[in-house]
Image: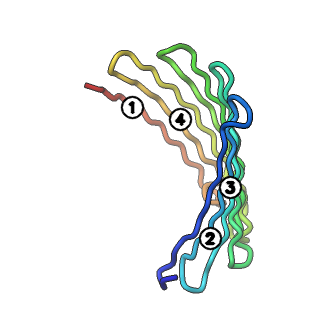
């Protein structure tokens, strides 16, 4: 690989095992420098029945550098209220092995979209506690309006 790094990856997914179920796995080696290569793996599943979809994902980063591994678990649910309105909620927790990162990062999000004709209005609220394993808490709100012509 080049001195500036590179990536090798592969992913496998299937949506034909059970109606409404989608599962997958991804593996990668990420070389950020000539001397450092991290192993990544992620697993996910989503299941949809009627107007409800639920999903889960687990991601692990096995860092070559000692005490820099990262593990993340994420879960979400969405509900199509009617042909115009949908809502969703998600949570995730990220655990850092690094000694300087003393807390787990916790994220929550809620969103809703309403579509009428060629216009979509959406709202998202995301919170992040202990950002990047530290003590900073963040919140983001977004209002979106789009038009299709």
Q: Is residue 75 visible?
A: no
Mark 1 surroundings: few (<14), some (14-19) or many (≥20) residues within 10 A: few
Mark 2 surroundings: few (<14), some (14-19) or many (≥20) residues within 10 A: some
> Mark 4 — residue?
125
- Mark 3 or 4: in front is 3
Residue drawn at x 47%, y 81% is 4
Of residues 97 and 146, which is closer to you in this image? 146
> Mark 1 — residue?
144
- Mark 1 or 3: in front is 3
Compared to residue 146, the image places residue 60 above or below, namely below
Q: Quadrant of residue 63?
A: bottom right
Element on which disc 3 rests: strand
Whole-Å distance between the Cαs marked 3 and 2?
12 Å
Mark 3 surroundings: few (<14), some (14-19) or many (≥20) residues within 10 A: some
Position of residue 41 measured from the top left corner of the image (x, y, whole percent): 69, 60
State which tag comes first along the sequence, 3 or 4: 3
The furthest residue to the front: 16
Cβ–Cβ under 8 Å for marks 3 and 2 = no
Element on which disc 1 rests: strand
State which tag comes first along the sequence, 2 or 4: 2
Whole-Å distance between the Cαs marked 1 and 2?
36 Å
Position of residue 14 measured from the top left corner of the image (x, y, whole percent): 66, 43
Compared to residue 58, the image places residue 7 above or below, namely below
> Mark 3 — residue?
42
């Amino acid at each position: 690989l080049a001195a500036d790094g590179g990536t090798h990856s592969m992913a496998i997914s299937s949506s034909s095992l059970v109606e409404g179920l989608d599962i997958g796995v991804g593996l990668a080696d990420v070389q950020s420098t000539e001397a450092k290569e991290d192993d990544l793996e992620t697993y996910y599943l989503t299941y949809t029945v009627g107007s409800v979809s639920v999903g889960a994902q687990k991601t692990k980063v096995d860092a070559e550098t000692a005490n820099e591994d990262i593990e993340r678990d994420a879960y979400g649910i969405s509900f199509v209220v009617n042909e115009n309105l949908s809502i969703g909620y998600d949570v995730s927790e990220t655990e850092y092995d690094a000694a300087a990162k003393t807390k787990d990062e916790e994220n929550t999000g809620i969103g809703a979209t309403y579509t009428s004709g060629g216009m979509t209005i959406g709202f998202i609220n995301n919170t992040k506690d202990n950002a990047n394993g530290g003590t900073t808490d963040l919140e983001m709100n977004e209002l979106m309006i789009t038009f299709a012509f």
